[in-house]
Image (cartoon, helix red, strand yellow):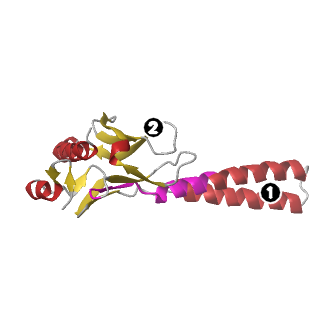
Amino acid sequence: MPTVGAVNFEKALEENPVPRRVGDVRLRFDSPLLLAEADRPAAGLAGPLLLAAGFGCALAALAALLFREPSPLALGAALGGAAALLVWAGASREGRARRRRRFTLDFDAHTLWLDLTLRPRGLPRSLVVPFDRVEALTVLEQPGGAWTLTVDVAPQGYPGKLREVLVADVRPEDAQALGWLHRLLDGAFDL
């Protein structure tokens, strides 16, 4: 039976069940794991439009080179550069739209597993952090009155701290669920 310090986690969950949602995150307890996954952000049209514009510029660059427009090299190079930039921007935007923020607490192994939204150089996209390497858990106020819950970790082999958002867009009506999650994590990380 998983315990955090001297607290029996399963017994605590019987008395205070896991809320289904906190802000933009869905929570689920599957003993001994607490699983959390953020909603997928709206994809929007920016990524596909940037990709289409990039491919259009690439075709225009090819046409300028093939049909020998006045100074085809300069025009082709400019359009080719614009095409590369637009395709890169569109692909980056699409990649970010597909990525999901996730975290998992393993109460048996005493680890926090993070799927990083932005990967710092030298770190993998997913990171397993022992509870004792978690340095801070902070609730930050967002513009518009919502809150965000962040965690500061010190990954092994990485210089410095890393801050990751666990939960975002917590509205005042979800304040009780945010308090529950904050107390749970604070106790697990022994902060």
Please report the residue visible at 45 percent of the width from the left and 51 percent of the height from the top. Answer: 116
Q: Is residue 44 visible?
A: no
Please report the residue visible at 25 percent of the width from the left and 46 percent of the height from the top. Answer: 185
Which contiguous range is marked in magenta? 89-108
Specify whether residue 98 is painted magenta: yes
Q: Is residue 85 left or right of residue 7?
A: right
Circle 1 — which element? helix
- Earlier along the polypeptide chain: callout 2 or callout 1? 1
Residue 113 percent across, percent down from the top left: 38, 55
> Residue beneath label 2, please?
161
Q: Residue furthest bottom?
A: 30
Q: Is residue 120 left or right of residue 173?
A: right
Marker disc for residue 61: 1
Which quarter of the rendered picture does the N terminus lie within? Answer: bottom left
Residue 176, located in which quarter of the rendered image? top left
Please report the residue visible at 64 percent of the width from the left and 53 percent of the height from the top. Answer: 88
Q: Residues within 10 Å of mark 1 (few under 14, many from 20)?
A: many
Count how many numbered circles sit on residues in the image: 2
